[in-house]
Amino acid sequence: MKNFLAFDLGASSGRGIIGKLENGKLTLTEVHRFANGPTEQGGSIYWNYPQLVEELKTGLKKALAIEPALDGIGIDTWGVDYVFFSNTTGRFLRWPYHYRDVRTGNAESDVWSKISKQELYGHTGIQCMTLNTVYQLAAHFREHPEDFKDSHFLTMPDALARALGGDDTSEYTDCSTTNLLDPVTKEWDWEVIDRVGLPREVFPKIVKPCTFGGTLSEELQRELGCGPIPIIKVGSHDTASAVGAVPAPTSGNWAYISAGTWALLGAEIDEPLRTAASEKESFTNEGGLDGKIRFLTNIMGSWLFQETRRNWREQKDPELSFAEMERMALASEPCRYLINPNDASFVTPGDMPQRISDFCADHGEGAIVDDGAVVRAIYDSLALYFRCKLETLASLLGVKYQCLNVVGGGTKDGLLMQLTADALNIPVVAGPVEATAIGNLLAQAMATGAVKDLAAARQVVKDSFEVRTYRPNEAMHALYNGEIERFKSLAK
């Protein structure tokens, strides 16, 4: 029997979960949950790094009260953000910037004046997004060059691990989100770094996931009354951990969606794909477990439902549930209205139902006046968008997919899972919900030898957690076939 502690941090919350691995099965116990979010100071947006460290300590204390013998601690977070540390004092230099901080406003043009957008994609294979670390570091260096002297940075999960006793290295999967990594060598791309004008000496050593990265500090051992606990490098980018927990079939071709606020659709590949076509279609090459590449694209996910519900709760029904919204959709005519889920007008918080109605009115669909039709438009449009992107993925990789695995919180939405199967005309296997924490825990198990490899880890997932298979409905598939060209014209 082995016991591991996973810390899984997102942009709005974090939690600590104990995983008990016994006889090839994994059981989960949540021990701590806490809020997270940006802090504004002096016109900039930061993460409260000291507070996050305190939350980790609290979670560790609670975990030890339940399970005194922990065999490892692993941390995963969102990507792209980082923390600078002094080489002299060892202390962090400033609260880490939030990826939405305004300093990156014109950083893209600054970087592209030194290396073009196309060259950058050709080197790193990462989709262009203003929040990528390359633009953050360029803006940081422009505004605070003093932070780059006698210092080094760590990506966010490893900066948090360092506070517990972790070493001064950063893990591959999270480093891959920086837009500064060579996806073939899995090391820093020094040509890109030099051309952007960033000092080489601030970059940490990159290490593989499923390896050891230090031991709980003696100070914390005394404070918590425990012995040494290994700190383990997991798939520290949360999506890498989630994909690691996909209960993939042992044969046939499968794709995945990590479904939450965003839906990340892709496939595991052995070598990066960095073509003009993959760049045009906004596919990115991020690091995965076992040396894999997560070839994926970002799609608006449950955000559309979340913002719609928030708006209606404020204006109409404070008790409105997602289950009630699902019933509203089922009572509405399928495909009466369609939208482009990834349209820029839907990205920011606001009156989402009105924006959806406006989109329909502006694109020849007619203005929506019925609430159920708003929800139904989201459902049908997401299912059709998943179909389009899976077709693009299949075309780029020259693969025909027999199965789509969906993991994460979005799998709780049974209607969306069913409509996705209908649109794709292949089975959709939904679950587990807690894929990110599970992938974190199983990476620790692989590091300690308790689980042999990624294939064995995925077998543990199959043996431990319930999943549900949704099979296509012929009538709905035929309906979607009749509307696909109309949808594509809206989603250009």
Image (cartoon, rainbow, N blue to C red):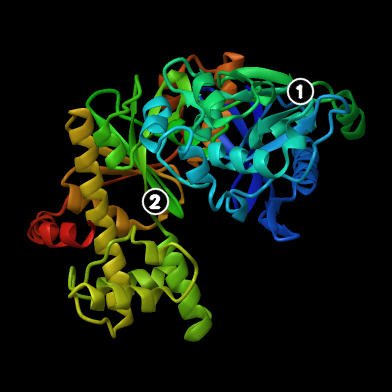
Q: CA distance from mark 2 to mark 1?
A: 34 Å
Q: Residue at x 11, y 58 (%)?
A: 485
| Image x and y of residue 176, in percent | 50, 29
Crowding at dot 1, Cα within 10 Å, few <14 / some 14-19 / many 20+, comes out as some
Q: Is residue 40 above or below residue 98?
A: below
The one nearer the camera, 178 or 225, is 178
Q: Is residue 456 left or right of residue 110?
A: left
Q: Where's residue 29, x and y in %?
A: 63, 42
Total marks in image: 2
Q: Which residue sits at x=15%, y=54%?
A: 473
Nearer to the camera, 4 or 214: 214
Q: Position of residue 324 (x, y in %)?
A: 39, 73
- Residue hosting label 2: 411
- Rendering quarter of residue 297: top left
x and y percentages locating residue 37 in the rendered image: 66, 56
395 above or below 131?
above
Identify the amino acid type marked 1.
Answer: Ile
Seen at 39% across and 55% down, the residue is: 301
Which residue corresponds to mark 1?
A: 229
Can you tell which quarter of the image residue 490 is in?
bottom left
